[in-house]
Image (spheres, rainbow, N blue to C red):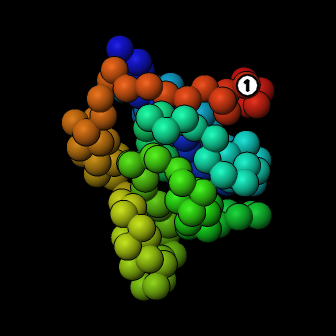
Amino acid sequence: MRRIRALIFDDNESICSVLWRLLEKRGYEVFTFLDPDSCPLHRTPSCNCPMDHACVDIIITDINMPNVSGLEFIKNQLKKGCKVKNIALMSGAWTDYEAEYAQRLGCQVFHKPFSLDELNEWLDDCEKKIDTNRALSNWFLDQVSL
């Protein structure tokens, strides 16, 4: 049985830290980035995961980020063939267009400030859908300095 693997993107270090602690407490393997541009996934031209693998189980990202918006990052990952099924986008300044677009992409939308109970409820739902015996790709771990 593998631990659930999650990526968190938020340029606010405090929010990143709170989310990391929450997911770590739930037993997740967690990787955080202050900007999607610094993540190796953003730099690849296509999804490098084998057909029956995904690199992570959950992605949580802020919308307003320094170099690449969270919405743009997710849109690009999906275009590349990313197989991650549980994606949440968060913002304190959603436009109607952004919120509708995120939902069309199949993403959970969180409005900052949101309660940790709200996030935990979504994570509970995600966990029910994740097969803990699934195969996860490790290609990006070799590129991330831990």
User: Is residue 132 positioned above or below 74 on the image?
Assistant: above
Say what secondary structure mark 1 lies in: loop
x and y percentages locating residue 136 in the rendered image: 49, 28
Which quadrant holds residue 16? Answer: top right
The answer to whether any part of residue 140 appears in the image is: yes
**Residue assigned mark 1:** 142
x and y percentages locating residue 109 in the rendered image: 38, 64
Residue at 54 percent across and 35 percent down: it is 50
Q: Residue placed farthest to the top in the image?
A: 1
Tell me the quarter of the image containing the C terminus: top right
Q: Nearer the viewer, residue 26 or 47?
A: 47
Q: Residue placed farthest to the front in the image?
A: 51
Q: Nearer the viewer, residue 17 or 66?
A: 66
Is 46 displayed left or right of 102 in the figure? right
The answer to whether any part of residue 21 appears in the image is: no
Q: Tag 1: residue type?
A: Asp
Is 135 displayed left or right of 142 in the figure? left
Residue at 42 percent across and 67 percent down: it is 105
User: Is residue 26 positioned above or below 67 on the image?
Assistant: above
Q: Nearer the viewer, residue 48 or 34?
A: 48
x and y percentages locating residue 110 in the rendered image: 39, 62
x and y percentages locating residue 52 in the rendered image: 44, 35
User: Is residue 2 positioned above or below 110 on the image?
Assistant: above
Which quadrant holds residue 30? Answer: top right
Residue at 35 percent across and 14 percent down: it is 1
**Neighbour class for label 1 at 10 Å: few (<14), some, many (≥20)?**
few
How many marks overall?
1
Residue at 63 percent across and 41 percent down: it is 48
